[in-house]
């Protein structure tokens, strides 16, 4: 029991069973924690039914209403540390992240990296099915983040990540403030400033084909302002 995949969900009934079964079909003996924010479409019910087929492997935390991506991951990270998992992954439920790449992220951490990032913007990485406007915003945000923070990560908003346990034990999780894309930036930034080794692994990011995107203007705005706030409020000390 050393690898846990944390998957936040809200209205993912079209994808949730398929993503769970796919992860469990991999050879790496992964466990899964679903953090569901009170999905009115019955996502949690589907997970509960599947728990009978995957006892001890499939776990569920239910929350009352949408509370933000970042807080879902923080809850999952804390639970993973309590249970003693060595490698903790974050991944979307909608197949925009290819579950097969979990093995590649694990290999990167097992061979020296402290944080492995599934990256769209390193050599070999790419994005499929995104409109040019969204690619422009995403790449522009990545360049903006690098310019402001000097963090050597080409895809700082990436949400497909593997953390070694020691990273999440060292980062003060209760002090992580952001909930959207800025959460992803802040976690990588804190890890980098604490001296942990970050490795970017090229992936192909495929926009969801089922369900609705969670991207909003507010999330993008939080990311842009969040980078500046991290510097202004001294988060470069990662403490």
Image (cartoon, rainbow, N blue to C red):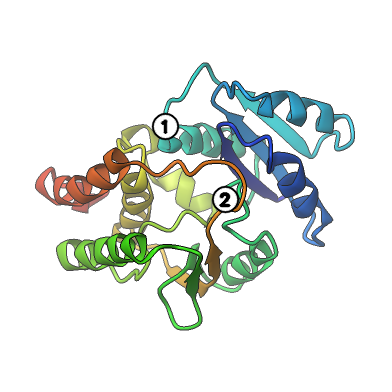
Residue 146 visible: yes
Dot 2 crowding, Cα within 10 Å, few <14, some 14–19, many 20+: many
What separation in Å lies between label 2 and label 1 (alpha carbons)?
15 Å
Q: Residue furthest bottom?
A: 123
Q: Is residue 69 above or below residue 152?
A: above
Q: Residue at x 45, y 70 (%)?
A: 120
Q: Measured from the top left, where is residue 87 in percent x and y?
A: 61, 53
Identify the image quadrant of residue 54: top right
Residue topped by disc 2: 91
Q: Position of residue 96 (x, y in %)?
A: 57, 57
Coordinates of residue 223 in the picture (x, y in percent): 26, 48
The tag on residue 119 is: none
Residue at (45, 83) in percent of width and height: 123
The C terminus - image quarter: top left
Q: Using the image as rendered, state which of residue 63 and residue 80 is in the foreground.
A: 63
* Figure label count: 2
Q: Which residue is mark 1?
A: 68
Is 92 left, or right, of 221 in this rendering? right
Give coordinates of residue 46: x percent, y percent. 76, 29
Crowding near pointer 1: few (<14 within 10 Å), some, many (20+)? some
Q: Looking at the image, which residue is at 46% across and 68% down?
A: 119
Q: Residue at x 62, y 47 (%)?
A: 210
The extreme top residue here reads: 64
Q: Is residue 1 visible?
A: no
Q: Is residue 176 left or right of residue 144?
A: right
């Amino acid at each position: 029991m050393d690898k846990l995949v944390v998957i936040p969900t809200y209205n993912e009934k079209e994808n949730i069973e398929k993503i769970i079964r796919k992860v469990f079909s991999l050879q790496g003996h992964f466990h899964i924690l679903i953090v569901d924010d009170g999905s009115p479409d019955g996502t949690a019910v589907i997970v509960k039914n599947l728990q009978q087929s995957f006892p001890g492997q499939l776990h569920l935390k239910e929350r009352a209403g949408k509370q933000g991506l970042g807080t879902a991951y923080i809850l999952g990270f804390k639970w993973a540390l309590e249970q003693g998992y060595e490698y903790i992954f974050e991944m979307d439920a909608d197949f925009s992240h290819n579950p097969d790449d979990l093995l590649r992220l694990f290999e990167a951490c097992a061979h020296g990296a402290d944080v492995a990032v599934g990256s769209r913007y390193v050599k070999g990485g790419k994005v499929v099915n995104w409109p040019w406007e969204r690619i422009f915003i995403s790449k522009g945000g990545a360049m903006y983040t690098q310019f402001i923070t000097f963090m050597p990560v080409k895809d700082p908003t990436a949400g497909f990540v593997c953390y070694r346990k020691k990273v999440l034990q060292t980062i003060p999780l209760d002090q992580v403030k952001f909930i959207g894309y800025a959460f992803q930036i802040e976690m990588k930034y804190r890890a980098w400033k604490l001296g942990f080794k970050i490795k970017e692994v090229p992936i192909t990011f495929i926009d969801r084909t089922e369900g609705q995107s969670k991207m909003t203007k507010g999330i993008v705005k939080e990311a842009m302002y969040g980078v500046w706030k991290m510097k202004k409020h001294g988060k470069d000390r990662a403490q």
